[in-house]
Amino acid sequence: MDRFQVEGPTRLAGEVPTSGAKNAALPCLAATLLTAQPVRLTNVPEVRDIRTMQKLLQHIGVFLSSEPGAVTVEAREIGSADAPYDLVKTMRASVLVLGPLLARSGFVRVSLPGGCAIGVRPIDLHLEAFRRLGAEVTMQHGYVEARAGRLAGAEIVFETVTVTGTENAMLAATLARGTTRLVNAAREPEVSDLADLLRAMGARIQGDGTDVISIEGAERLHGAEHSIVPDRVEAGTYAIAGALTRGDVTVTRCRPADLKALTTRLSSSGARVKAGDDWLRVQGTDTLEPQDLATAPHPGFPTDLQAQWMALATQMAGITTVTETVFENRFQHVPELVRMGARIKLEGRWAIVEGPTPLTGASVMASDLRASAALVLAALIARGETIIDRVYHLDRGYDRMEIKLSNLGGRVYRSSFPTGTFPIPERTR
């Protein structure tokens, strides 16, 4: 398994481009199953989860061709409406094939998904949505089976906000007879990006970006071309890195409007923040003031930036309280940060961070995708060498992070060997 060696402390400076959003590309790849015509996606990130989804689509029987940053899918026929455990055990987003396969072929069998161990994250809301649309749904031996004739539009009220649940229901409803209303729908930019693709394919969708989405079912959808929205979590990670290292980092090819919950707090902490239509510049300062936060669905503070913010909080001058409201087990990075010298106390869903605290290099282990990013950020300011094991978690959602950080002046090296020399990654623009 790959690991990172990070030598700190260091100051980051320069420009870093944002890749396409993994959390938008995955539902868009699932949407290609809704039509027999080719769908071309551009600005697709080169990350592990995308490769896993491509393997799943090929297992289903689609024609798929890829090039750097782009994928073309042609689902002329559905060869297999089955997603086995071996293909979905590492990625929760695999559940997104449920909706389009059910709508297109009338039957689907999908293993319960895997992914980061950050909470229970049941798919009950997905299954209830399919039942509301007229499907018969059963779950046994670790698999979900759903079958139906043509689905029928319905009003679906989500008990809690669910991003993948909203996306799955949208995907199924595009081919349903009549109108479907999703109430208490997720408002995330990735949901709107999926809606943009579906509209380009001929779907009739209104209200995305609000908590009520309306879908008027179509007889069939057609091919389209779509550019994936920039990854706001990746952009936010590098913005936090600029503030943390007292650096000067400009994140390009991003959408600052999607990051207001973060940039508002960065400015309040004392960091200097400037933004244009597609760029975000963050300059660190000598003193950062504590900023309490609680994660929440969009437009609140993203849970996917909570761990990175906690790394920043270790350098704030005072007490910072972090409340995790979305997932019940998303503080697995805390013991590893403590190994590096951080002073953090946990009380249920609350973390109390005391700063500023000098960090030192240590051997730490990544437990999930965003925890991995937090450890890399902390290592950038830690004195000495930090070894981060199990960075395959990081590779699920960050496109060549070690190269992007190296181009900013970071000393971050990847190795596939447990011992020995760590090669310096090639610098690219």
Image: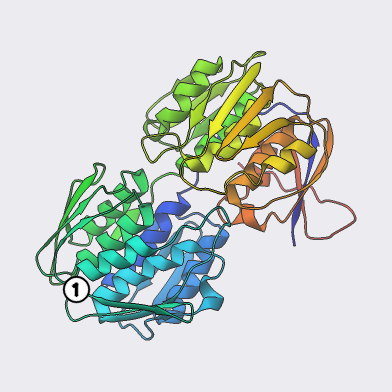
Q: Which residue is mark 1?
A: 134
Q: Observer-nearest residue: 401 or 111?
A: 111
Q: Is residue 150 above or below residue 10?
A: below
Residue 414 relative to residue 25: left or right:
right
Tell me the element at label 1.
Answer: loop
Q: State the scheme by which the image is colored.
A: rainbow
Q: Observer-nearest residue: 202 or 397?
A: 397
Residue in the image at 51% along x and 43% along y: 304
Residue 186 relative to residue 132: left or right:
right
Residue 309 relative to residue 411: left or right:
left
Q: Quarter of the image containing the C terminus?
A: top right
Q: Quarter of the image containing the N terminus?
A: bottom right
Residue in the image at 65% along x and 13% along y: 287
Q: Residue furthest bottom?
A: 79
Q: Would residue 235 be visible to someone looking at this image?
A: yes
Q: Is residue 151 above or below residue 169?
A: below
Residue 151: x %, y % from top left: 18, 73
Residue 124: x %, y % from top left: 36, 64
How many discs mark residues in the rendered view? Answer: 1
Q: Would residue 239 be visible to someone looking at this image?
A: no
Residue 419 relative to residue 194: left or right:
right
Q: Residue furthest left?
A: 178
Q: Is residue 266 above or below residue 3?
A: above
Residue 360: x %, y % from top left: 82, 32
**Label 1: how many residues lie within 10 Å, few (<14), some (14-19) or many (20+)?**
some
Amino acid marked by disc 1: Gly
Residue 192: x %, y % from top left: 29, 48
